[in-house]
Amino acid sequence: MKVIDLFSGCGGLSLGFIQNGFKIVKAVEFDSSIANTYKKNHPEIEILVDDIRNIDNCNNFNKGDADIVIGGPPCQGFSMAGARIRDGFIDDDRNYLFKHFFNIVRTVKPKIFIMENVKGLMTMQGGKTFDEICNIFSDENLMNGTKYHIYHKVLKAVDLGIPQKRERLFIIGIRDTSIEFELKLKGTTQRIINKHPTFFDPVTVYDAICNMPTVTNNGDVANPVPVSAYQKYLATREATLSNHIKTNHSKVAVERMQKIANGDNFTSLDEDIKSVHSGSYGRLRWDDVAPTITTRFDTPTGGRFIHPVEHRTLTPREAARIQSFPDDFIFYGNKTSVCKQIGNAVPPKMSYFWANFVETLVTDADKISTKLI
């Protein structure tokens, strides 16, 4: 089945579908540095590097181009939407990213679309914004005669065997056909267990990164032997791993980190740390999961991202492990760009779940001879 990935980033959402045998026919990413990582990891995929408003036209998208459209339009304007009428919501300039996601779904008319966003979208303006988005996609008049049945699910990373407290909202639209959503989710879980029996097992920080060798100046290290089921799931046969390079912390920062015990943070320091983050100078615990990996995982003041035993923050490779990226996925660009790529990505294991969800729909549709897929 063919997939279009909008707002693709470095490719976390694409990757889960690729791992399950789907074909990404087109991806869209505005940031050229981030798009470079996508392209180098997936050279066979066409990626459009441009603002989506410049490519939302018939030269790039047409009916039937893909069976599935996926993507996570950033939500800058959603919180300002309130209870506006639909035309006002969809035409609000602050919602232009969502508008173009909607436009492309309306144009391509995929059998399924999956839109990823922040969990807080459900409660913005007392839930009115979320309801408005669902109404827009299910309105046959706005969708040029096509009706999508809308479902949603908040996935918790820890429930998918990902060692962090990330939660993401997924809105799923299925064209013309309603389904027993919860039943399909259960079927998806069983399908994955049949393929990967340990997929949903709880994973700790230790399970994710305990075998990582000493950091190097260029980030390339010998491929370590995997010692946990999670490491085996992400392992590569390549001789080396990339992106295992530490941040050059100041002497003051290192001295502070030396005073922080497992699970503690800046409150252990006898000084006034100016940070808006409650987890500032927080040290990870081996036997726990990490907080949500953000774009600031390389910064002591950015959250609880200090290595469990070393006096440094996580390396990009360690953060990628905690995000469930496979070891052979390489991130390109400067430090700021790489941190942004990893922190903003959809964990590939989350994406893999939805790819199997679609596979469940396809299999069930074949069994009962419907026209769902």
Image: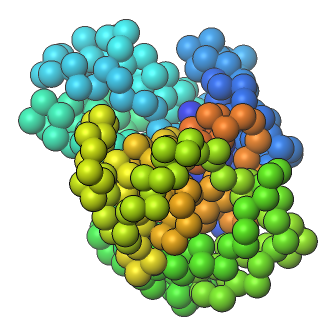
Residue 348 against residue 141 in the figure, above or below:
below
Q: Position of residue 118 (x, y in %)?
A: 34, 43
Residue 302 as seen in the image, left or right of residue 271 = right
Residue 344 against residue 90 in the figure, above or below:
below
Residue at coordinates 73% horizontally, 62% vertically from top-left? 215
Q: Position of residue 216 (x, y in %)?
A: 79, 58
Residue at coordinates 54% horizontally, 81% vertically from top-left? 207
Residue 66 as seen in the image, left or right of residue 312 = right
Residue at coordinates 32% horizontally, 74% vertically from top-left? 183
Which residue is outermost to the right? 239
Q: Position of residue 348 (x, y in %)?
A: 58, 60
- Of 319 and 55, nearer the camera is 319
Q: Quadrant of residue 33?
A: top right
Residue at coordinates 72% horizontally, 25% vertically from top-left? 32
The N terminus lies in quadrant: bottom right
The answer to whether residue 296 shows anywhere in this view is yes
- Of 276 and 12, nearer the camera is 276
The way the protein has been coloured in the rendering is rainbow
The answer to whether residue 149 shows anywhere in this view is no
Which residue is outermost to the left? 126
Residue 275 as seen in the image, left or right of residue 302 = left
Q: Position of residue 339 (x, y in %)?
A: 59, 42
- Of 114 and 110, nearer the camera is 114
